[in-house]
Image (cartoon, rainbow, N blue to C red):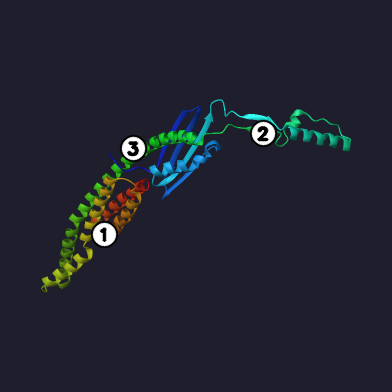
Amino acid sequence: MSLVKSMTGYGRAVETVNGREFTVELRSVNNRYLDCAVRLPRLVAFGEDAVKQAVKNTISRGKVDVFVSVRSEGGEQGTVTLNTALAEGYLAAMRQMAETFGLENDVKVSDLSRLPEVFTVDKPEVDEEALLADLMAVTNEALAGYDAMRTTEGAALDHDLRSRGARILELVGQVEKQSPKTVSDYRARLEAKLREVLANTAIDESRILTEAAIFADKVAVDEETVRLRSHLNQMNTMLDAGGAVGRKLDFLLQEMNREANTIGSKCTDVAVARIVVDIKAELEKIREQVQNVE
C-alpha cells in the first residue's frame, strides 16, 4: 500500500450529538506550506484552535478550508425578560415630548419593543468542554474521510511517478547504448574527411585516435547518466518511505532536470537528442504530479 498522500482532498461528516446537529466539511488544494482557515458559528467559536490543531496533526502541507455548522434541535432555549424600569422611562420621556411639543402620543407596544435594551435575552450557560468534545468527535470523523481520499489519490500518484521513473530509466539506457556509437561514428567521419583532403598522403592514425579521444571526453555523459539513475532510485526510496515527501521530491526533480540538460548540451547525435527530449517530457510530467504530493 502506498504511503504517499495527495494534497487535494475532501471530507464531510454530519452527526447529531446531544440535541445538536454538527456538520463539518474539509477541502484542500496545493500549497507550499500548511495554511488552514476555519469558519465556525458563534456557538463554537472557542473551538477554533482545537480544530486547527486536529488538522495540523493530520496534514503537513496544503491550503485547507474547514467549514462547521451547528443546528440545535428546537433552537437554543433562552429566557426573555422585560426591563420594566427602562420601558417606563421611555414612556415617561415620550409623554413629556408629546406635552412639550403638542404632539399626539401614539406610542404602541411594537414601537416601544424596538427601543434598545427594552428586552434582555438570557441564554442558558453552555458546557463548553462537552460542546468541544462533540465538535471534535465530528471533526475527527470528517478528517478520517478526508484522509482516506488523500490516501487513495496518493496511491495513484505513487503509481504514476514510479512508472514514469521506470520509463526514464529505459531512456537513460538508450542514451548509454548510443553514446559509444556517437564516438565511433565521429572517428569514421573524421577518417573519411582526412582521406578526402589528404588524398594519397599517409594518414597519422595516432592523430585520429587523439582527436577521437578528445571528442569522446567532450560528449561523455557517463557521470550524468549515473547520477540520473541514482536520483531515480532515490525517488523510489522516498516514495517507499512515504510521509510528507513532496518538497524533497521537488528538489530532487530539479537535480534530475539539471542532469538531463547537461546530457542534452553534450550530445551531437540526433538520436541522443531525441531521447533527451523524451526524458525531459517525462520529467515535466513528474514535476506536475509532484506538485500534488504532500
Task: Give the left or right position of residue 281, taking residue 86 as reference.
Answer: left
Q: Are marks 3 and 1 in contact (CB under 8 Å)?
A: no
| Number of numbered discs overlaid on the protein picture | 3
Q: Which residue is denoted by mark 2 in the rendering?
A: 120
Secondary structure under badge 2? strand
Residue at position x 45%, y 29% in the image: 15
Q: Are marks 2 and 1 in contact (CB under 8 Å)?
A: no
Distance between the alpha carbons at the discs numbered 2 and 1: 79 Å
Above or below — where is 251 with respect to 57?
below
Above or below — where is 162 with respect to 125?
below
Amino acid type at circle 3 is: Thr
Task: Give the left or right position of residue 271, taking residue 149 as reference.
Answer: left
Amino acid type at circle 2 is: Thr
Q: Which residue is denoted by mark 1 in the rendering?
A: 263
Residue at position x 40%, y 47% in the image: 61
User: Where residue 209 sits in the image (x, y, percent)?
Assistant: 14, 69
Secondary structure under badge 3? helix
Image quarter (top left, top right, bottom left or bottom right) of the N terminus: top left
- Say which quarter of the image contains residue 58: top left
Pick whichever of labels 3 and 2 is earlier in the sequence.
2
